[in-house]
């Protein structure tokens, strides 16, 4: 089994290298924006979009053109990589996975990638890496890089430079440990598991919100591009990157713990993009309140969910487990005891109380249990044998009173095989 892994380090460039990296990032941004503008023009004229090969040919022309000859100072592969990125942005847009490609601004995802491993030399013993047109770059060596280097990405964040080294290596297929679990993602609690455990809200932003707001205000009072403005801007960037680090750390810890202890994880298809759309309104009529609501806080939350799912997926795969996406259907309104579906089952955002049988519990746990049982049903519908699965459900989740009130052992409106809650072992997927 092949395992891809990224190792991220802080770079320690000298002055010359730092200036060059800034220049290369600028050249990459320029090429991306120029190509995007060109594609837009072609579209307006009713012409077909240029393919990657066509764009590469243009790039060569730009590098030879006296007006944009400075592009030739930047390494060619990272520039071409930007054209590939643009291609991907277009196909993501056409597949409705992303918004229409945006023009890139300075200071906004300043990054570039060296895709050709033959041009990269990693010297871990001396804490340095060789890259075309940059030479030997020193980095803060905090962990051993394992596997064959495939490519590297250089990025700037909060006034610092980072390198992400992607590697590939062969590993023995892992045997998954643990049972199946459903996860409900929310705002009051970031993630709630069907076994009752939960992760605190993703509020790393809120804690820094006040400081960020003050720093932003201070920046707006300064004369633009003055020295004090630059200092204030650096401070805003530092707070932003601290928020990012805290969030990354939180997500990694949660996704590692869950993927280590479960062979199968079910999550709801959130349609993250649509969720942020609904608060953002339309591009034509954003509205003031709507705009505030859909601000940074919201987008960070969306990113958090998306990133969490991405991490769960690859970490589960490393451990031989699987992430399964369950279509969202009344998971928050269905009684796991009697199967009754009603919006009235949710007297408050946090509490679930079935109007039919009286079963009560924390609403997020109910959601997670419903996601789990829906996922198990999905597997049975696919013809999988799930009788051997141990299901991560809280031991006391069905109080005796509720069970008596229901008179049956229904989960999510379907009869549950008794083996599921008692057998130990993992699902044979
Ligand atoms: Zn009920």
Image (cartoon, rainbow, N blue to C red):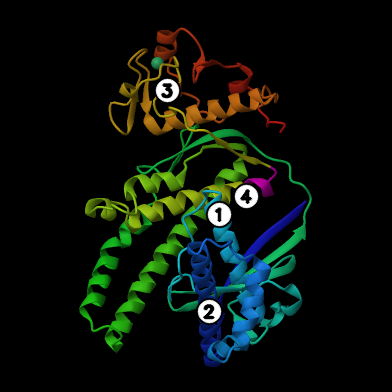
C-alpha separation, residue under disc 1 versus residue under disc 3: 34 Å
Q: CA distance from mark 2 to mark 3?
A: 51 Å
Q: Residue at x 57, y 47 (%)?
A: 312
Label 3, label 4: how many angstroms apart (C-alpha)? 30 Å
In terms of sequence position, does the residue under pointer 4 or pointer 2 come before the other? 2
- Which residue is tagged 2? 25
Question: In the rendered image, which residue does mark 3 sit on?
Answer: 334
Q: Which residues are magenta?
A: 316-320
Q: Position of residue 261 (x, y in %)?
A: 60, 41
Instruction: Determine the secondary structure under disc 4.
Output: helix
Label at residue 9: none
> Is tag 1's residue or tag 3's residue first in the polypeptide sequence?
1
Q: Which residue is mark 1?
A: 92
Q: Residues within 10 Å of mark 2 (few under 14, many from 20)?
A: many
- C-alpha distance separating marks 4 and 2: 31 Å
Cβ atoms at labels 1 and 4 below 8 Å apart: no
Indicate which label's residue lies in the foreground, 1 or 4. Answer: 1
Q: Earlier in the sequence, mark 1 or mark 4?
A: 1
Nearer to the camera, 411 or 223: 223
Classify mark 4: residues with Cα within 10 Å, few (<14), some (14-19) or many (20+): many
Does 127 sit above or below residue 98?
Answer: below
Residue 315's label in the rendered image is: 4
Give whichever of 224, 233 is nearer the camera.
224
**163 left or right, relative to 132:** left
| Residue lying farthest to the left in this orientation | 221
Say whether residue 312 is left or right of residue 365: right
């Amino acid at each position: 089994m092949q395992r891809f892994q990224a190792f991220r380090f802080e770079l320690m460039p000298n002055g010359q290298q730092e200036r060059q990296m800034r220049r290369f990032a600028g050249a990459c941004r320029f090429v991306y924006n120029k190509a995007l503008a060109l594609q837009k023009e072609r579209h307006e004229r009713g012409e077909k979009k240029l393919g990657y090969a066509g764009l590469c040919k243009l790039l060569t022309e730009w590098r030879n053109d006296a007006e944009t000859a400075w592009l030739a100072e930047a390494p060619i592969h990272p520039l071409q990589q930007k054209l590939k990125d643009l291609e991907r942005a277009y196909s993501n847009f056409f597949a409705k996975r992303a918004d229409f490609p945006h023009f890139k601004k300075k200071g906004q995802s300043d990054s570039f990638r060296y895709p050709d491993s033959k041009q990269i030399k990693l010297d871990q013993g001396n804490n340095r890496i060789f890259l075309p047109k940059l030479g030997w770059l020193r980095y803060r060596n905090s962990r051993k890089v394992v596997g064959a280097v495939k490519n590297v990405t250089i990025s700037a964040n909060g006034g610092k430079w980072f390198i992400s080294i992607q590697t590939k290596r062969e590993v023995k297929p892992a045997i998954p440990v643990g049972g199946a679990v459903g996860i409900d993602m929310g705002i009051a609690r970031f993630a709630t598991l069907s076994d009752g455990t939960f992760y605190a809200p993703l509020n790393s932003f809120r804690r820094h919100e006040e400081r960020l707001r003050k720093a932003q205000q201070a920046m707006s009072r300064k004369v633009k591009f003055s020295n004090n403005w630059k200092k204030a801007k650096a401070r805003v960037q530092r707070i932003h990157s601290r928020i990012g680090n805290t969030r990354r750390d939180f997500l990694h810890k949660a996704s590692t713990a869950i993927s280590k202890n479960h062979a199968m994880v079910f999550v709801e298809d959130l349609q993250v993009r649509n969720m942020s759309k609904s608060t953002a309104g339309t591009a034509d009529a954003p509205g003031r309140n709507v705009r505030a609501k859909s601000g940074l806080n919201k987008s960070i939350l969306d990113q958090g969910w998306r990133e969490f799912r991405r991490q769960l997926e690859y970490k589960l795969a490393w451990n031989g487990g699987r992430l399964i996406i369950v279509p969202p259907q009344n998971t928050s309104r269905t009684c796991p005891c009697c199967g009754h579906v009603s919006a009235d089952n949710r007297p408050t955002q946090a509490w679930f109380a079935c109007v039919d049988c009286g079963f009560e519990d924390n609403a997020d746990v109910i959601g997670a249990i419903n996601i789990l049982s829906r996922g198990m049903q999905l597997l049975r519908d696919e013809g999988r044998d799930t009788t051997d699965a141990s299901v991560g459900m809280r031991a006391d989740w069905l109080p005796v009173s509720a069970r008596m009130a229901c008179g049956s052992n229904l989960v999510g409106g379907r009869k549950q095989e008794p083996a599921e809650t008692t057998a130990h072992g993992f699902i044979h997927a």
